[in-house]
Amino acid sequence: MDYFKVAAYGLVICSQLTYAGFTLAETPTASDRSRGTIGIMDKDKYQCFIPIPEAGQTVLYDFTASNSPCKTDTARDVEFNEIPSATTILLTDNKLCDTSDLLESFWFRFKTIKKSTTTDYIELEYFKSYVPGAVVRPGLLLTDLWLKPGNAIVRDKLSCVQITTSAAPPSSVTETSAVPAQP
């Protein structure tokens, strides 16, 4: 028996199981899926998912921070999964999601315009070909963008995602004091 081959195969299997464990750790939970997620994928096809916040909240994800759900700032593709209507999403290479800092290369702002917006993975470079007001995919409206003059580099530079959900509508209409009808 060739112990070298057995050891090599064992290492390959262990590395695959370890990678699968990391991938499973990054999958969205059931509660995340009920509100929706944004999927981020890098050039090596590593995926992570950002949960959409509760109604009426804004959350900022800095991918360079140690506590970020996505440990990469080299994203190449994004996908939107069951995002509620009227959610605003900002994608930028500025780690603070600051759109006034024009030293960075890009930012894109989107708004979902249907009840539940879902897309396939879209390359960040692809967004450069749209103008504000364009529907990128059904339910996903590009509301604004900024690109550094001189062919801004967008690929592998996403550092921040900011998500703002709209306030939830009232759950029921309260009745006003009504006077019974007179016969």
Image (cartoon, rainbow, N blue to C red):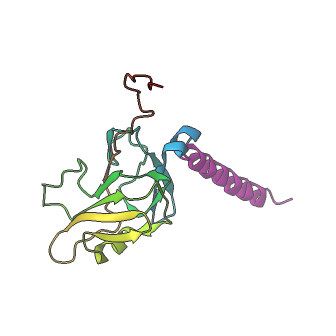
Please identify the dominant SS of the magenta region.
helix
Q: Position of residue 168 (x, y in %)?
A: 39, 39
Q: Quadrant of the N terminus?
A: bottom right
The residue drawn where x is 13% and y is 60% is: 103
Q: Nearer the viewer, residue 115 or 12?
A: 115
Q: Nearer the viewer, residue 57 or 7?
A: 57
Left or right placement of residue 172 versus residue 152 in this view: right
The residue drawn where x is 42% and y is 32% is: 173
Q: Nearer the viewer, residue 123 or 90?
A: 90
Q: Position of residue 51 (x, y in %)?
A: 45, 44
Q: Nearer the viewer, residue 15 or 53?
A: 53
Total tally of numbered discs in the picture: 0
Q: Position of residue 179 (x, y in %)?
A: 40, 22
Say above or below: 18 vs 106.
above
Q: Position of residue 94 (x, y in %)?
A: 23, 54
Residue furthest to the front: 183
The residue drawn where x is 41% and y is 27% is: 175
Reply yes or no: does residue 7 show up in magenta.
yes
Residue furthest to the right: 1
Reply yes or no: does residue 56 show up in magenta.
no
The quarter holding residue 58 reads top left
Magenta-colored span = 1-28
Say above or below: 66 vs 75.
above
Left or right placement of residue 33 versus residue 63 in this view: right
